Image: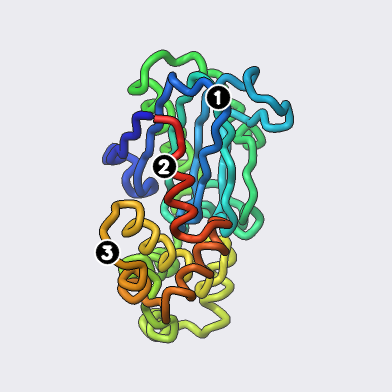
Amino acid sequence: MKTQVITPHPSVAGYVSNIVVIENNNIYREAVLPLIANGYPSITFQVTDTGLLLNSQKNMDSLVLYGQNTKPIELFTCGYVVIIAYFLYPHMLKALFGIDAKELTNISIDLNFFESARSISLKEQLLNAITLDKRLQLMNGYILKLAERYKPGINNTIAFATRTIQKNKGLVSLTHVQEELFVTERTLQRMFELHVGVSPKTFSRICQFHSALQQLSQNQFTEMTDVAFENGYADQSHLIRSFKEFTNYTPLEYLKSASEFPQ
């Protein structure tokens, strides 16, 4: 499996945090690639040999918008696989798509549901494109089209709030964030539900979990208790409960599961 993390083109860097591309043409059995909560909604293009999937109900749309997810989402793959995921900044759903972010929490929608993608046959263009560069150009063009349509739709207050929470790996006081923005607790709650899709507290917990997940995935630890304490968990049991909530696995079970994905 070949995985690339691509820096977004400057033209879309204000909307897209990062781009992840996964390619594999050696999966001879069905495999499940989980999408785990990381605080970012995404536009994901996927090509796989759906005809090889054992359960037809697992056939997936090839171009999907994912909102914030607090539960793992399973991508079923088999045979030739290409996945291009554009991870949007947390506050971008409302700005780019003009809908309340809460409506998309733990939900995925075929992008053809939106006239903005359907009118330019984006899915068909991506499926017909031969090279990765061409597909990235198409995705970039679509992002810019959305940005132009809803400009100026970015809420700077919620952008600051999400940036502050992410920078502090979810461990910043929400009262401090409210004071910095001169807003009440209820106002901050409403803004997060409208623009991000989850409460400020839940978003903070996702950021905290994601920080721990990155440390584990990069094998930057000796003891599990070190990961717990370095990421603000009270103890190892607290870390394990968080992992089970967001992945359905304990940390060690998750690492074992991830290592079994075909290479």
Q: What residue type is labelled 1?
A: Arg
| Residue 144 point in image, percent of width and height | 41, 37
| Residue 244 point in image, percent of width and height | 55, 62
Q: How crowded is mark 2: few (under 14 residues within 10 Å), some or many (20 or more)?
A: few
Return the residue at label 1: 29
- Could you say which is closer to the camera, residue 165 or residue 52? 52
Residues at marks 2 and 3, CA–CA distance in whole angstroms: 18 Å
Name the quadrant containing residue 121: top right
Residues at marks 3 and 1, CA–CA distance in whole angstroms: 34 Å
Q: Residue 208 carries which label?
A: none
Return the residue at label 3: 222
Q: Is residue 200 above or below residue 127?
A: below
Tag 3 or tag 2, which sits nearer the N-term? Answer: 3
Return the residue at label 2: 259
93 on left or right of 22? right
Please state, as top left, top right, bottom left or bottom right, where the N terminus lies in the image. top left
Residue under the image location 68 percent in, 25 percent down: 54
- Per the image, label 2 sits on a secondary structure element best described as helix
Residue under the image location 53 percent in, 68 percent down: 192
Q: Can residue 126 be seen in this view?
A: no
Residues at marks 1 and 2, CA–CA distance in whole angstroms: 16 Å
